[in-house]
Image (cartoon, helix red, strand yellow):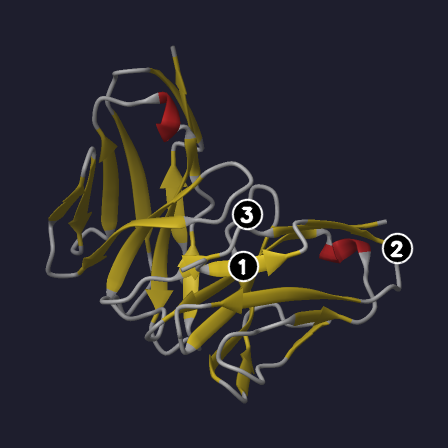
Amino acid sequence: NAGVTQTPKFRILKIGQSMTLQCTQDMNHNYMYWYRQDPGMGLKLIYYSVGAGITDKGEVPNGYNVSRSTTEDFPLRLELAAPSQTSVYFCASSYLSGQGPNTEAFFGQGTRLTVV
Amino acid sequence: KNQVEQSPQSLIILEGKNCTLQCNYTVSPFSNLRWYKQDTGRGPVSLTIMTFSENTKSNGRYTATLDADTKQSSLHITASQLSDSASYICVVPMLGGGNKLTFGTGTQLKVEL
């Protein structure tokens, strides 16, 4: 199993540009998540999905959109990139709810995004 | 306010030495607490998950403790190795919070020769 795979690993965007961060998992997990990690801060939840066709907002959803058309894929869309979106983005997945005591979340390697 | 606070912020130790990292949380209600290891440029990897009924849990050279009464957890690393250099993150789920995991800011550990 490859686990959780994110692409690209690095990206530089100009203000106002749009892009999609790709995330795919091959563990047949129902739950998928997008986090951002800013320097010196804990990871913050952007969006999450409990299954194909179902998505919901996390703590910091503004400026982002997601879709979940398949169990495997959970892309994150930035429509109008802003400098405040410069961050490292992590996709994660878990079999059961990531809050449960008998499950763990598996993370991708991250996408480092810079908006200039 | 649901928070997870970790100390120290950073730590440098010599190879072979032991160290203990601290985590205090105010998340309520409480179900479980996780410790993750995050190598530079990588995603976090789970070290251990502890429920409120567990006091101690080991994973190789890593031993986590939990005191649910005082809302404190610690991660003890024994006989440190260079590969232990990483950020160690304490995570507590906020039940009913829309699958929200409250992440601490991490302790940056550096193991030197």
In the picture, residue B53 is in which quadrant?
bottom left
Marks 3, 2 in one chain: yes
Which residue reaches farthest bottom? A53
Crowd band around label 3 with a 10 angstrom C-alpha radius: few (<14), some (14–19), many (20+)? few
Tag 1 near tag 3, CB within 8 Å: no
Image quadrant containing the N terminus of chain B? bottom left
Mark 1 vs 3, N-terminal side: 1
Point out residue B27 in the picture as x, y percentages from the top left corner: 34, 62
The answer to whether one can see residue B1 in this image is no
Which residue is label 1 attached to? A5
Establish if A38 lies above or below A105: above
Number of marks drawn: 3
Considering every residue shown, the one lying at the far top of the view is B113
Mark 1 crowd level (few <14, some 14–19, many ≥20, 10 Å Cα):
many
Which residue is located at x 63 percent, y 71 percent? A75
The reply to whether the C-beta atoms of the residues labelled 2 and 1 are less than 8 Å apart is no
Relative to B113, residue A35 above or below: below
Residue under pointer 2 = A14
